[in-house]
Amino acid sequence: MISPLAHVDPSAKIGKDVTIHAFAFIDADTVIGDNCVIMPYVSVMSGTRLGKNNKVYQGAILGADPQDFRWKGEKTYCEIGDNNVIREHVIINRSIREGQATRIGNDSFIMAEAHIGHDSYIKGRDVIGNGTTIAGDTEVGECTILGSNSLLHEGTKVGDWAFIKGGCRIGSNVPPYVVIAHNPAVYNGVNAYILRSRGYKEEQIDDIASAYRHIYQSGSSLFNAMKRIEADIEPSEIRENILTFCRDNNLKLVGVKTDL
């Protein structure tokens, strides 16, 4: 169902069983996948690609022009996967780089008034709280929770299964499986409750806790903490996720000494 009071550009590609309510604006060069619901006053701007089964609530703007002086009008994109809920007044900016995209994966819940900047990558199955601000070139891993009004500075990365509590300002990288709280942001333990609820075993959670005792509570540099993790914890996917994240992100973690 497409309301006659909605504006849908003739070049827009609309899938099967899509509902577009009155006063929505669907720009040229857009794609809306099957079974999506577009509520009143939503704007889907040029370059936006929506997958299947997404619901977008009132006042959201998808594929907005990037808020970055480096963007000079290049043709860029905003790519959103399947089964996402995007609540009221969310703004998602397109990329600033020719032919590239801001990307949102599948199965995420993006709450009201969140803002996702250019070239960010939200991997999927994430919860992004009310009023959360995600700057450009930021990456958020799978199954991560960003509490309401948290703020991620440009270029930061957050690992899988992390939980950033409401109001935190994140200027460094957040490794997987942790809880981050307070300002300045600090390590606040392992995200054990969520991990247990999703089927992680106690021995796996113990390994995560042991790894982060070395990183956050030993008083050692991160370089030395990583050596201790390799020596003390049996090889596993979880251990490798933690070590790989640390190596790939130049040893710059929230609340950790980086001297060698």
Image: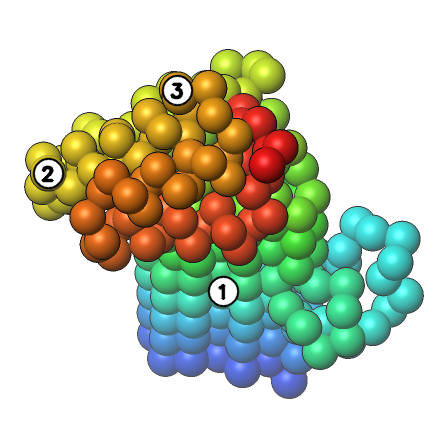
Does residue 222 appear to the left or right of 36 in the view shown?
A: right
Residue at (51, 51) in percent of width and height: 247
Label 3 vs 1, first from the N-terminus: 1
Asked where in the image residue 215 lies, by quadrant, the reply is top left
Q: Position of residue 58 (x, y in %)?
A: 52, 45
How far separated are the C-alphas under marks 2 and 1? 36 Å
Q: Amino acid at mark 3?
A: Gln
Q: Position of residue 163 (x, y in %)?
A: 38, 32
Instruction: Give the label, 3 or 1, closer to the camera.
Output: 3
Mark 2 and mark 3 in contact? Answer it, CB < 8 Å.
Answer: no
Residue at (49, 64) in percent of width and height: 80
Q: Could you tell me which secondary element the residue under label 3 belongs to?
A: helix
Q: Quadrant of the N terminus?
A: bottom left
Q: Residue 203: which numbered mark, if any?
A: 2
When the figure is inspected, residue 68 is found, relative to residue 187, above or below; the finding is below
Does residue 172 appear to the left or right of 148 in the view shown?
A: right
Badge 2 density bin: few <14, some 14–19, many ≥20, Cα 10 Å: few
Q: Could you tell me which secondary element the residue under label 2 belongs to?
A: helix
Asked where in the image residue 260 lies, by quadrant, the reply is top right
Q: Which residue is mark 1?
A: 80
Q: Amino acid at mark 2?
A: Glu
Residue 132 visible in the snapshot: no
Q: Amino acid at mark 1?
A: Ile
When the figure is inspected, residue 210 is found, relative to residue 1, above or below; the finding is above
Badge 3 density bin: few <14, some 14–19, many ≥20, Cα 10 Å: few
Q: Which residue is mark 3?
A: 217
Mark 2 and mark 1 in contact? Answer it, CB < 8 Å.
Answer: no
Badge 1 density bin: few <14, some 14–19, many ≥20, Cα 10 Å: many
Label 2 vs 1, first from the N-terminus: 1
Q: Could you tell me which secondary element the residue under label 1 belongs to?
A: strand
